[in-house]
């Protein structure tokens, strides 16, 4: 019954998105839709590793949901009535984000400079490390260990380069400008980064691109967006399955103690990948007593200062305690709870809801490359918030800083904060 209730909420969100046409990727629709679907799956309890959640788990989850939604609506009270009218009436898909030759040249040059920094950093890392993960005998281990602190931040600019390239290509099409050079940069970046076997950035790139294409082009609509997301998760599962023979697939099915017919063993991996994040959270918060006071929420800051490892060792911090399966990820709530308990969940979820809505409205009211990039990061954060929190990662904070830096060097149309 609980599962049906949450699936029903998901369906209502989709119906509402269809009725409003342009609101599928609004923060509130995304948040409620994603989390109601995930909790619905969790409540099916199809694995022997799943348990009935204690009341405290539900309290923490509803505090997070309520705080996010409250933050969303608190920001709404700050919106000027004239901005509300613009927000409703503005034809976003017909909007040109590049409106002059100077803007065209500036954006093209920005992508080119980022690409040059990326490619120099990439080959410098290769020379210093002495190998490329894909060509390494133990590529599974090499892909995790590859990277030099500081330098790898510039290699991770691949995500921003590829996203900017998608925006540039479609905006150039709107204006009838050439985009062949940027298309070449996109392909080279895509191929070279593939050799590092770090798929997470590709995943974020696709999500961000879908959000941009939906809001500012006619190439993607609600139907195509939903299909694209389903295909995306299907492709990720297919990539994962390439490494799994039928025997291993059956093994995972039995080890996971699934409660459905073996004929559907192929569903084990995606199901467990989604639900075990919340199960890990439930198991941990009901046993957890040693708070970490900012070490996880501000992980990016500790990493930036170079003292992250020393802090974790000195205070014996285990960022993934009480794990009893191979699935070791947690939802976005975990860093906040680990650091500050349920108060942290309340405060930071409120901040997330407030800032997410602010980023969305700024993108809609002042549409430009700077604001759309910021919101695409926010949208991607919400879509995958059930298994990670990208805003605790140094590489994501660095990319947001680069985005800010680029569009405050030059007075791009409406790009000022």
Image: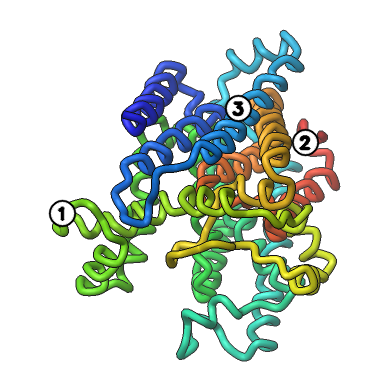
| Separation of residues labelled 3 and 2 (CA atoms) | 32 Å
Q: Are marks 3 and 1 in contact (CB under 8 Å)?
A: no
Q: Quadrant of residue 262?
A: bottom left
Q: Residue at x 38, y 51 (%)?
A: 50
Q: Could you tell me residue 85's position as x and y percent?
A: 65, 10
Q: Which residue is mark 2?
A: 415
Within-10-Å neighbours for mark 1: few <14, some 14–19, many 20+: few
Mark 1 or mark 2, earlier in chain: 1
Left or right: 123 as drawn, with respect to 272: right
SS class, disc 3: helix
Left or right: 188 as drawn, with respect to 369: left
Q: Residue at x 55, y 83 (%)?
A: 132
Is 279 placed above or below 210 here?
below
SS class, disc 2: loop
Q: Nearer the viewer, residue 148 or 113?
A: 148
Q: Which residue is mark 1?
A: 261
Q: Which residue is mark 3?
A: 66
Mark 3 or mark 1, earlier in chain: 3
| Separation of residues labelled 3 and 1 (CA atoms) | 37 Å
Q: Quadrant of residue 346?
A: top right
């Amino acid at each position: 019954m609980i599962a049906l209730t949450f699936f029903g909420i998901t369906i209502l969100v989709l119906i509402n998105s269809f009725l409003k046409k342009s609101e599928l990727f609004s923060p509130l629709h995304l948040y409620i839709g994603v989390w109601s679907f995930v909790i619905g799956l969790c409540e099916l309890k199809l694995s022997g590793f799943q348990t009935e959640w204690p009341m405290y788990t539900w309290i923490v989850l509803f505090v997070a949901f309520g705080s996010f939604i409250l933050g969303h609506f608190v920001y709404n009270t700050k919106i000027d009535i004239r901005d509300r009218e613009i927000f409703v009436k503005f034809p976003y898909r017909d909007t040109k984000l590049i409106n002059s030759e100077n803007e065209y040249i500036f954006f093209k040059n920005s992508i080119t400079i980022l690409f040059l920094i990326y490619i120099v950093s990439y080959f410098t890392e290769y020379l210093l490390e002495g190998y490329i993960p894909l060509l390494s005998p133990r590529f599974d281990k090499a892909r995790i260990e590859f990277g030099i602190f500081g330098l790898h931040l510039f290699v991770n600019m691949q995500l921003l380069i590829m996203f900017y390239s998608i925006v540039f290509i479609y905006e150039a099409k709107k204006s009838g400008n050439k985009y062949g050079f940027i298309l070449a940069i996109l392909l080279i970046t895509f191929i070279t980064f593939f050799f590092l076997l770090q798929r997470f950035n590709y995943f974020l790139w696709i999500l961000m691109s879908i959000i941009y294409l939906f809001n500012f082009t006619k190439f993607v609509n609600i139907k195509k967006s939903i299909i694209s997301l389903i295909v995306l998760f299907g492709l990720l599962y297919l990539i994962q399955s390439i490494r799994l023979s039928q025997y291993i697939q059956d093994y995972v099915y039995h080890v996971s103690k699934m409660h459905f017919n073996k004929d559907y063993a192929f569903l084990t991996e995606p199901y467990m990948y989604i639900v075990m994040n919340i199960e890990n959270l439930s198991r941990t918060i009901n046993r957890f007593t040693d708070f970490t006071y900012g070490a996880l929420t501000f992980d990016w800051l500790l990493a930036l200062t170079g003292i992250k490892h020393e802090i974790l060792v000195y205070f014996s911090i285990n960022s993934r305690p009480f794990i009893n399966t191979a699935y070791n990820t947690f939802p976005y709530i975990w860093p906040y709870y680990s650091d500050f308990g349920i108060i942290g969940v309340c405060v930071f979820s409120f901040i997330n809801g407030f800032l997410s809505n602010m980023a969305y409205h700024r993108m809609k009211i002042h549409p430009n490359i700077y604001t759309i990039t910021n919101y695409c990061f926010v949208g991607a954060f919400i879509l995958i918030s059930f298994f990670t929190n990208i805003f605790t990662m140094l590489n994501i904070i660095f990319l947001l800083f680069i985005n800010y830096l680029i569009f405050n060097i030059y007075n791009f149309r409406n790009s000022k904060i």
